[in-house]
Image (cartoon, grey):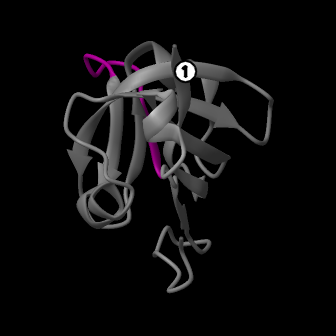
Amino acid sequence: MLLTLLKSKIHRAKVTNADLNYEGSIGIDKKLMEAAHLHPFEKVEIYNINNGSRFSTYVIEGTDKEISLNGAAARLVQIGDLIIIASYCILNEAEIRTHKPVIVFVDETNKMNKNYL
């Protein structure tokens, strides 16, 4: 049996930009991408803490401390909204026993806190 589990998440990131005219995606600070084990073009789920919107998109590398929603997703956020960025993986039952998701916490400027799992 295969199950879908949380691979990683960036918790309470602040939206710094929303560009409706971009082709789509979420731009994420490269350091945060690396800490959360996210790859360019990887599918992620976005959970907007401010308005309850939930949607999926793909990752692109952003600039320092950037969290930018682009394309149609820009309609689902406002600059300053807090979001959760979650990625998932598909594991078999043997892999599940040792799997530990990576949780990255950020401050109000999207700087990674030192305490992340």
Across and down, in percent, residue 11 comes to 61, 56
| Count of marks overlaid on the render | 1
The residue lying furthest to the front in this view is 94
Q: Which of 64 and 114 is in front in this view?
A: 114
The residue lying furthest to the bottom in this view is 114
Q: Residue at x 46, y 75 (%)?
A: 111
Q: Give the range drawn in magenta.
A: 16-24
Residue 18 highlighted magenta (yes or no): yes
Across and down, in percent, residue 71 comes to 38, 18
The residue type indicated by label 1 comes to: Leu
Residue 86 highlighted magenta (yes or no): no
Q: What SS does tag 1 mark? A: strand
Q: Which of 87 and 82 is in front in this view?
A: 87
Q: Residue at x 57, y 32 (%)?
A: 46
Q: Which of 109 and 85 is in front in this view?
A: 85
Main SS category, magenta section: loop
Across and down, in percent, residue 62 comes to 25, 50
Q: Name the residue under label 1.
A: 3
Across and down, in percent, residue 109 comes to 52, 72
